[in-house]
Amino acid sequence: MELRARFAVGIVGRSASARRDVLILEAVSIRFQVLAQVTLFAAREGVSFNFQFDCTGIVLSILVLCFLGSAWWWDR
């Protein structure tokens, strides 16, 4: 969380490196979240536990990528 707050301050200051780093961080975050969901779903076979798919983190990461990746948001 501290890392995202530091990037938020850099983005407010229109730092191109902060923008690039956030795009990389969110892309990595999506990969780990999808991998975790797939792993939990695959582990469900033969194991008795309650599996709930939570896509909130994935959706938020995609929204961050969309907003920071668009020229409209960055040029406003």
Image (tube, rainbow, N blue to C red):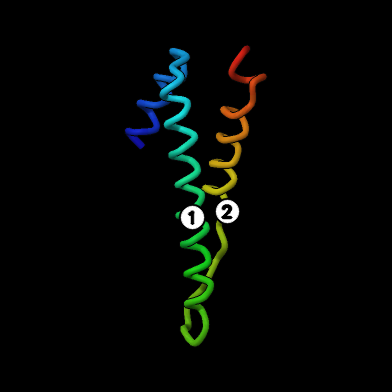
Q: Quadrant of residue 25?
A: top left
Measure how far apart labels 1 and 2 are at the Cα level: 8 Å
Task: Identify the mark at residue 33; answer none if there is no mark.
Answer: 1
76 left or right of 36? right
- For the point 59% across and 18% down, which residue is it? 74
Instruction: State the residue at coordinates (59%, 45%).
Output: 59
Q: Is residue 42 above or below residue 75?
A: below
Is the residue marked by circle 1 packed among few (<14), some (14-19), or many (20+) residues within 10 Å?
A: some
Using the image as rendered, state which of residue 40 and residue 65 is in the foreground. Answer: 65
Residue type, numbered disc 2 = Cys
Label 1: element kind: helix
Residue under circle 2? 55
- Judge whether 26 appears above or below 15 on screen: below
Q: Which mark is residue 1?
A: none
Position of residue 58 measured from the top left corner of the image (x, y, whole percent): 55, 48
Residue 64, given in percent of the width and then of the height, sits at 56, 34
Locate residue 1 relative to residue 26 in the image: left or right.
Answer: left
> What residue is drawn where x is 51% and y is 73%?
50
